[in-house]
Image (tube, grey):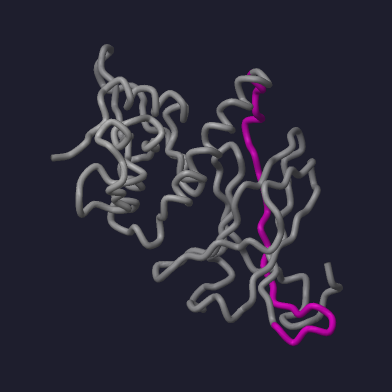
């Protein structure tokens, strides 16, 4: 027996996430118009944080059927992220999913409280990567420099990570979220030893901002391939 979500719980989970995938690295809209006037295309799913039945991902036997099918045990995701979450409970833990959910709902709450703010037609950010050392530290790092190149608007960086066909890793050296004014920069770093895949390494860093845009990195050619930077 599965403790599935009732339809009203699914609708509430979708609305609380403004029909956007709660995975901060995805942010895919999950509903929109279909080809006919009265139809809607939906690619969203109400996923269980702890599984709906025995043997599922992150199953918690201490929950009652009512608790297992309640809003507090659900997160709104796109179909792709919903399958990934169900297939890999080691990577997508209860703590991570609750964190995604809380951040998505908090972002929706802030947007309502602050009112609608039109965004410029084009939001741009430049992501440059180079290798260097901190002064007095033999550990070599990749330094990721992010510049808000949007003239008319601030941007808010929410996540920075490395992603290739083989694996991905979050970059957590500098505190996020970080708001950047036009042409302001932010820099973070990760030890070279933590990046196992060196194929096109300079093009595999990713940055996502609060509006959902994802930016891809390029090598910073204005600095020496190897060098030192002052401590933070």
Q: Position of residue 2 (x, y in %)?
A: 17, 39
- Residue numbers of the magenta segment: 116-139
| Residue in the picture at 24% in, 17% down | 36
Residue 28: horizontal and vertical position, in percent?
43, 39
Residue 219 quadrant:
bottom right
Task: Give above or below for 157 relative to 37.
Answer: below
| Residue positioned most to the bottom | 138
As drawn, 52 above or below 15: below
Residue most toward the left?
Answer: 1
User: For this view, does 122 lie left or right of residue 88?
Assistant: right
Residue under the point 27% across and 37% down: 64
Image height of 217 relative to 114, above or below: below
The image shows residue 175 at horizontal and vertical percentages of 70, 54
In the rendered image, residue 17, in percent from the top left (x then y), is placed at 46, 30
Using the image, determine if residue 7 lies above or below residue 155.
Answer: above
Q: Quadrant of the N terminus?
A: top left
> Residue placed farthest to the front in the image?
62
Taking the magenta stretch, the answer to whether it contains residue 229 is no
């Amino acid at each position: 027996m599965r403790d599935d979500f009732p339809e009203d719980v699914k609708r509430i989970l979708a609305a609380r996430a403004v029909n956007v995938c709660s995975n901060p690295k995805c942010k895919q809209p999950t509903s929109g118009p279909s080809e006919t006037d009265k139809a809607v295309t939906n690619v969203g799913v109400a996923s269980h944080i702890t599984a709906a039945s025995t043997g599922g991902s992150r199953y918690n036997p201490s929950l009652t059927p009512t608790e297992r099918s309640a809003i507090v045990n659900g997160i709104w995701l796109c179909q792709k992220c919903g399958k990934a979450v169900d297939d890999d409970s080691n990577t997508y833990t209860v703590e991570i999913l609750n964190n995604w959910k809380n951040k998505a709902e908090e972002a929706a709450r802030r947007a309502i409280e602050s009112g609608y703010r039109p965004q410029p037609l084009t939001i741009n950010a430049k992501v440059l990567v180079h290798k260097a050392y901190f002064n007095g530290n033999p550990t070599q790092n990749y330094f990721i420099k992010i510049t808000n190149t949007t003239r008319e608007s601030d941007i808010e960086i929410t996540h920075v990570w490395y992603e290739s066909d083989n694996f991905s890793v979050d970059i957590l050296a500098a505190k996020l979220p970080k708001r950047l004014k036009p042409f302001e920069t932010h820099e973070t770093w990760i030890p070279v030893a933590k990046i196992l895949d060196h194929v096109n390494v300079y093009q595999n860093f990713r940055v996502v901002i609060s509006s959902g845009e994802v930016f891809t990195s390029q090598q910073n050619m204005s600095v020496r391939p190897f060098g030192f930077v002052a401590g933070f």
